[in-house]
């Protein structure tokens, strides 16, 4: 008997009716508040406020020296925020969901979010050019516009987006709550791990959380574009299949094997037998006539042998009859 776990591995007979999220007032308010927080963090770092002082205090505290026993584990844990490995893992899961549900929406949502992440976070990184803690040149400085690329934290923003997509694409409220808690825990841990190792300032991590959350909150604005893209891909696939079927050579149907044509006399006799005509022993005569028709019985090189009765009926010609001429009859 099959269990529910194995039953869920089967492909659904038809695509489920999943309603894409819309930009509601609540979501729009969260997006506006997160954007304001994002701009406030950038402004606080630009003016070298108390946030930069806190960054230096945490960096000089050197957490990786305070708790060295955690270093080996956190070196592997931080991989959950790297774009390549996490994108591959999540894409495999969403690819299976796309196959099972007959839809490309999960993969298209993932691709859209990663594209937004690379454009927005990458542009801010290169535009502000902040140096990391290991490359700082002056104590107390914000290290802005110095050719760096660590503000905001790409590991943190990627963890928020990549694992948050699973919660965004959840189909039930219960799954959405659980996945939201898991993605928040993973992204929080990845951000603090980068601070522990010393590759990012604390303000980099805070800005990375805000950047990833902005992308997740903005995804409903791109849902119509995702739906049109999915429809276009399916149309292209159908046209390609039709051209492939049209270009395939059509094979003629193989008919039944034709019977071997016999001579007219044999065919006529066979038809008579099939119709039930003739005497019970007619098939024997017919077989004899067939053999007589196909195989000659008299060889032209040998003379025909006369029957025995015919030989007795002929006049005897021999030494006796030929040597004794007829004697005349005389009178007594």
Image (cartoon, grey):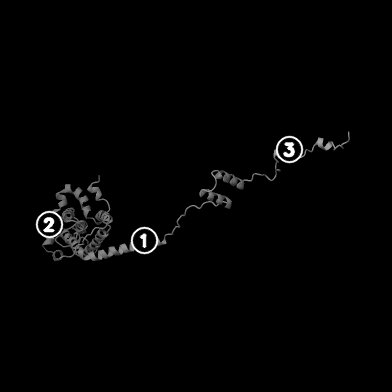
Q: Quadrant of residue 180?
A: bottom left
Q: Is 328 drawn above or below residue 122 in the view shown?
A: above
User: Which residue is labeled 1 in the image?
Assistant: 241
Q: In the rendering, at what x and y percent does residue 220 appear?
A: 20, 64
Which label sits in the foreground, 3 or 2? 3
- Judged from this view, the residue extending furthest toward the top is 332
**Residue at image location 25% in from the left, 49% down from the top:** 7
**Residue at image location 74% in from the left, 39% down from the top:** 313
The residue lying toward the viewer, choosing from 177 and 208, is: 177
Left or right of residue 235: residue 37: left
Q: Earlier in the sequence, mark 3 or mark 1?
A: 1
Mark 1 to mark 2 CA distance (whole Å)? 63 Å
Dot 3: element: helix
Circles 3 and 2: CB atoms closer than 8 Å: no
Circles 1 and 2: CB atoms closer than 8 Å: no
**Residue at image location 38% in from the left, 63% down from the top:** 243
Q: In the rendering, at what x and y percent does residue 188 appear?
A: 16, 55
Left or right of residue 173: residue 325: right
The residue lying toward the viewer, choosing from 268 and 277, is: 277
User: Which residue is labeled 3 in the image?
Assistant: 312
Please identify the quadrant where the C terminus is shown: top right
Q: Is residue 185 visible?
A: no
Dot 2: element: helix
Left or right of residue 228: residue 325: right
- Judged from this view, the residue extending furthest toward the right is 331
Q: Which mark is residue 57?
A: 2
Q: Earlier in the sequence, mark 3 or mark 2?
A: 2
Dot 2, crowdedness within 10 Å: few (<14), some or many (≥20)? few
Q: Earlier in the sequence, mark 1 or mark 2?
A: 2
């Amino acid at each position: 008997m099959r269990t529910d776990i194995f039953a869920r591995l089967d492909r659904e007979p038809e695509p489920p009716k999943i309603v894409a999220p819309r930009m509601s007032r609540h979501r729009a308010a969260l997006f506006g508040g997160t954007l304001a927080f994002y701009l406030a963090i950038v402004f606080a770092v630009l003016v070298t406020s108390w946030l930069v002082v806190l960054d230096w205090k945490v960096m000089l505290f050197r957490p990786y020296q305070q708790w060295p026993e955690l270093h080996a584990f956190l070196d592997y844990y931080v991989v959950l925020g790297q774009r390549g490995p996490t994108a591959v893992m999540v894409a495999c899961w969403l690819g299976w969901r796309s196959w099972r549900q007959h839809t490309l929406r999960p993969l298209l949502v993932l691709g859209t979010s990663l594209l937004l992440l690379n454009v927005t976070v990458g542009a801010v990184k290169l535009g502000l050019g902040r140096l990391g803690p290991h490359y700082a040149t002056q104590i107390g400085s914000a290290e802005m516009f110095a050719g760096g690329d660590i503000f905001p934290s790409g590991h943190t923003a990627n963890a928020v987006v990549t694992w948050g997509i699973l919660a965004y694409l959840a189909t039930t409220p219960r799954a959405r709550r659980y996945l939201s808690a898991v993605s928040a825990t993973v992204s929080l841990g990845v951000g603090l791990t980068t601070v522990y190792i010393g590759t990012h300032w604390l303000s980099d991590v805070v800005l990375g959380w805000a950047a990833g959350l902005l992308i997740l909150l903005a995804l409903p604005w791109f849902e119509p574009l995702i739906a049109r893209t999915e429809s276009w891909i399916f149309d292209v696939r159908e046209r390609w299949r039709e051209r492939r079927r049209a270009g395939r050579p059509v094979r003629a149907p193989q008919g039944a094997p034709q019977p071997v044509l016999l001579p007219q006399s044999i065919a006529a006799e066979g038809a008579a037998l099939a119709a039930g005509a003739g005497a019970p022993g007619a098939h024997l005569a017919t077989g004899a006539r067939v053999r007589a028709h196909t195989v000659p019985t008299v060889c032209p090189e040998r003379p025909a042998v006369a029957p025995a009765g015919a030989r007795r009926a002929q006049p005897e010609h021999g030494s006796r009859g030929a040597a004794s001429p007829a004697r005349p009859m005389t009178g007594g």
